[in-house]
Image (cartoon, coloured by chain):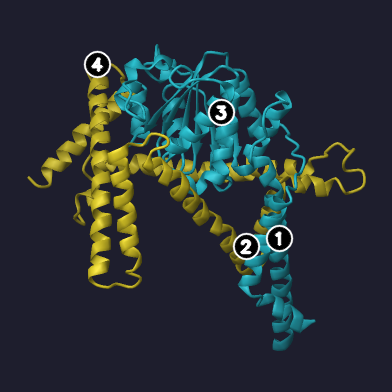
Chain colours: A cyan, B yellow
Amino acid sequence: MGGLLEKLDRIDRRFIYLLMALSVLVPLAFRLEMPIPVSPGPSMDLYEAVDALPPGSVVIVSYDYDPSTMPELQPMAVALTRHLMSRGVKIIATALWPQGASLAQNALTQISDSLGLSEYEDWVNLGYTVGGAVSVVRMGSSISAVFPRDRVGVPYDSIPVLEGVGRLADISMVIALSAGDPGIHAWVMVAQGRFGIPVGGGCTAVSAPEFYTYLGSGQLVGLLGGLKGAADYETLLKRDNPGAPGGTATPGMAAQSISHLVIMGFIVIGNIAFIAGRKRKRGGAK
Amino acid sequence: MRTILPLAITFVTGMIMVLNFFVPHRPFNSMGNSLSDWYMIVASAAIFLGAMNLLQVHFARIRHRARNWQYSPVAIGGFLLMLTAGLVTGVEEGRAFDFMFQNMVVPMGATMFSLLAFFVASAAFRAFRSSNWRATLLLVSAFVVMLGRVPIGDLLWRLVPGAASGAHPSLVTEIAEWIMQVPNMAGQRAVMIGAALGVVATSLRMIFGVERSYLGGAD
């Protein structure tokens, strides 16, 4: 028994990698799906806040992430964009991360085309701005000062969807999808704290705990944390719009569930071996 | 003069931004707006510095045949290729820049981040040990949150007789959410308030010229 535990303690890392790969690949390959019960919480709060927006209102969605965190954040971007567009809410896309502008364009064109909406009439992608929180401060007095043109060079003043939108006070809500800094912190501190605009957020699972303070203080109207948050949103969207196409987060939850169990299994094995080794050492010392 | 001028600029700009926050009216708001515009211009210029630095570092690696220098020509080539494509064809959908971004940068970026799962699994196995009661508490909390953040946690809980029809069919999620909303939030608040007070103190020290390390000297 002692020999087996010692062997387990020195398990080859390649075996761990193989099991991890299988735990992700098998559920995805066999399209394993799990029911996603959505209980009241930050995901539902954000969904309800978006759902309460009247048609025609204007929302800023800030795509503050890059391809490395895209597997977690893009599904929530797609689900949120679909929800907003299907409710007739106008979207102004911005990005505090350089590569976020192109990822925003993906989500916007994909949903806009499927709903028959048009760029510049129903949504616009203003692209990337440098400066993080300072640019958000500047948007408080003039959005066109930060974005004189959109992502491809169309002047701000000639874009129909931006008519009557001069500064942050003209915006009904800001939703920041953020992989780090600049991101949710900047929008909460400036757009919400200074100008009183409701802010919702979406972030990677690993960074979600730090934003719970803003949920507790009411500075965030809701939060999608990681793939689970995206899957919650997709489930709620599907509940209210049964005809809507499914997203990529819901199928991903099965893979994430199994991989979490595998990691927990390894931690348990590691601890059994550790405790047995400690007992053995104590026994030897006596 | 080399010290006084930067200190004076820091004091004046810092005070304008502070006054702009508390008195958002003329002349402070227009002065604050101008300074914000200047900040964005200076920050944009930093992008060029970054690009120049990237080229400088990698050309030096090639020249000195530093360890793994073979990757440097790939980095320089990739940088120049994307730069040329962006400048020549623009960044609109369907253009060369967009094609390379969607089909090369996006999958490679996602791949790099996904490798983290393997390292986390291996590191958790080797390092996540219940060596004392604090580590055990952390371990138990992590288990509950890991199960509560995926649907399988509640599905497993509902296998317990009576759990599915009981008062708390989503008990694992509820406990995970409690951990996030009570002990986690308390800890995060402490960190955030501490950091914010530190930022205020450091900013005031810089504005009033007490903190001068940003000028490049030790004093």
Q: Same subunit under labels 4 and 3?
A: no
Q: Chain of mark 2?
A: B
The residue indicated by pointer 4 is: B26
Is B157 on the left-hand or right-hand side of B109?
right
Under mark 1, the amino acid is Val
Is A131 on the left-hand or right-hand side of A265?
left
Question: Which of the two discs, 2 and 4, labels the residue nearer the N terminus?
Answer: 4
Q: Which mark is residue A111?
A: 3
Q: Nearer the viewer, mark 3 or mark 1?
A: 3
Q: Same subunit under labels 1 and 4?
A: no
Residue at 41 percent across and 20 percent down: it is: A168
**Which one is nearer the viewer's eye here, A185 or B206?**
A185
Query: Mark 1: which secondary structure?
Result: helix
**Which one is nearer the viewer's eye here, A75 or B5?**
A75
Q: Chain of mark 3?
A: A
The residue indicated by pointer 1 is: A262
- Graded by Cα atoms within 10 Å as few (under 14), some (14 to 19) or many (20 or more), the crowding at tag 2 reads many
Is A133 on the left-hand or right-hand side of A240?
left
Q: Which mark is residue A35?
A: none
